[in-house]
Image (tube, rainbow, N blue to C red):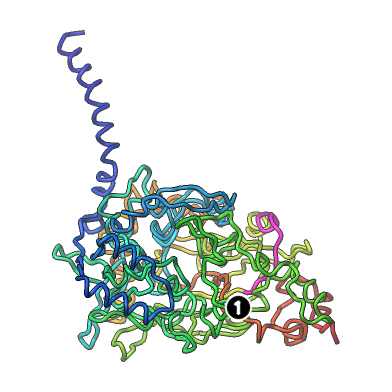
Amino acid sequence: MSKRTRTFLLSLIVILPLIAVLGWTNRSTLINMMMPADSRPGQITFDVHRVSAEEFDRIAADLESEFDMDFMHVEIFREAGITAYEGPQTCLSCHEDIVVEDAHSGDEKTVSLMENLLTSTHYRFFTEEHPNVYGFNGELADNFPMGKINRPCPKPGSFAMTAWAELVVTEHGDTLSEGCGQCHIGGQYQAPLGEMMPGYVTTQEEKDAIDCLICHSQGYDMNRKQVVMDDNGLKRWDMDRSMRAAMSVTTTTSQTCLRCHQHNFGGDIYVDSTDTSYFQSLLNTGRERPRVLHPGSKRGTPFSPSWDVHAAAGLNCTDCHVTEGHYIAKGTHTTTMMTNDLPGVEIACASCHSDEPHAENEELADFLNMHTERVACVTCHIPSLQDDNATMRDFDTPFYEEHPGVYVYTDIEKETQPKSGITYVWWNGDATFLGNPIGDNPNGRDLYRFYKPQHTWPEYRDFDYEGWYENVMRPIAKKKPSKLYAMKVFNGKQHIDLQNMGPFGGMFVPYNLPTYYRTGNPSKAAAKEMEKSMMPMMYGTMFKYYMMDKFMRFMDDGSGTQIKGWNTGPYEDVRQMKEGKVEARWIPANASMEISHAVRRDGALSCQSCHSESGVLDWKELGYDDEEAEMYSMNPLE
């Protein structure tokens, strides 16, 4: 070996580890550089509003007169001389570490606030643990980043990856704010996409843009939550960083949670006049560029005093939803809510009400309590939905709304009653990849099937759905005991990439929201959105092997023959909306979404609601034979 060769090899031995160390140290920068320029986090300069001593005292007096609450931070700020809120760094000056209660053991432990927050669903928009979600191929959809960050939203018809912050100019010349980022605590130009990549470390710019106050401030001004465009031409969601908001910090309340979550429960139109504090987002939509209010709520179950006994009793969300710092439990029973910080932590009515909750009517108590073994509480105690809810949403046939001057989807059905808006299913807490509740009738006769497509696509008219069900889904449905649950019916008709589909559905094509709202042309809006920088990347090699192949595998029937993985080839076909390659379709099977709010005592279903010839339950569909169906259709108390 020559001296030159030895020198070269020794140099490589020294240099390569240095390159590896530098690459690992700067891995977040490298990951972000792989993203399109408009999808990377950036340095954002937020306005800092410093107040004088007189202004401080005036704000404190106003808060005291407006709220019947103790705002301890007023005195903390006064003593510390804090006269301006400078984002998370102000919070972290005292709260770098927090003491939390372990949601499993109940023991107290100290954790880093920022680390706890950055690994939560409310920041990441996804989790990797999904122990109750199964692909149609029978595989558990676990150890896989999944959530709102990479799943389509049936409200506006978009992806968080592409529709984060949009400005919509109406026919009247007004400018509206729209996009998924309005319900996210990060204030960056894009969803936290880097978090999905292995080894990613949240950048300081991303930490500095976090909106702590939208969850923790009673005096937060939702009119500040509107889209702004910075000097670099990038759009983001603004936030309230005023001293009024900072001085009114508390632990979260139902009202602060519902600034985002009422959008899902009661929707963007209905306001309960009994207490409007539960509807802050609807009443404070933004001053200069108001947020778009979407007609047709996803679930039709407002959490407010007129609709839910727990709201009327003054309960906060976290009285039921156990927390571990910023980790918030959703329970072990979820369908469309794929992300869950604490998937092993149960949320159950029996935690407060016991397994025998009916005690007042001595004659009926034993009879009613007998039902709790097989019938979930919500089955009787959510007897109807709010009028403005969507059952069947057609994105392909928009109509023009004079106010605010935009085209919106058509909700061709807004059903509110049992048998139409509410369906009843056996459910063991698990769900399919598209949110169908998995379960089986406990009688063990194999007469019940939770999946029956109502809108079979022409390519799969000969597909053996029944055979697939018995081979793949029946064993999963029997794994755990099921109860009878009330569920919200929903389906949406949206453009589908027909070269990335299977018997259970296909890849949604997102709509460019400004184009959709302004033109009312869904095909034009879909083609426009395909030009967004993230879409060719999504159809590229990196996304294919890191995410999309696995995503599509869950849509196969388990044979490996229906879907061969993510097909990257159709990008141009989809962008050009080629006939026969893209088409608006209903999802093959209607979704049955879990409902757990709008719980009522008065008006709950009675014995005759189910046990009569005109009852709300279809006993044969629920897996009973003719003789049993006839028997259960009679009121046992008569």
Residue at the limit of the structure toward the front, as seen here: 79
Q: Is residue 222 above or below residue 34?
A: below
Q: Is residue 433 above or below residue 242?
A: above
Q: Position of residue 431 (x, y in %)?
A: 58, 61
Taking the magenta stretch, the answer to whether it contains residue 87 is no
Q: Which residues are magenta?
A: 475-486
Can the viewer see residue 515? no
Would residue 100 appear left or right of 522 to someone viewing this image?
A: right
Number of numbered labels in the structure image: 1
Q: Is residue 613 above or below residue 592?
A: below
Taking the magenta stretch, the answer to whether it contains residue 480 is yes
Question: Which image quadrant is residue 602 in?
Answer: bottom right
Question: Which image quadrant is residue 261 in?
Answer: bottom left
Residue ID at (29%, 41%) = 27
Would residue 399 appear left or right of 85 to someone viewing this image?
A: right
Q: Amino acid at mark 1?
A: Val
Near-viewer residue (286 or 190): 286
Which residue, given by chain and number where applicable, does mark 1 sit on?
599
Would residue 114 appear left or right of 146 to someone viewing this image?
A: left
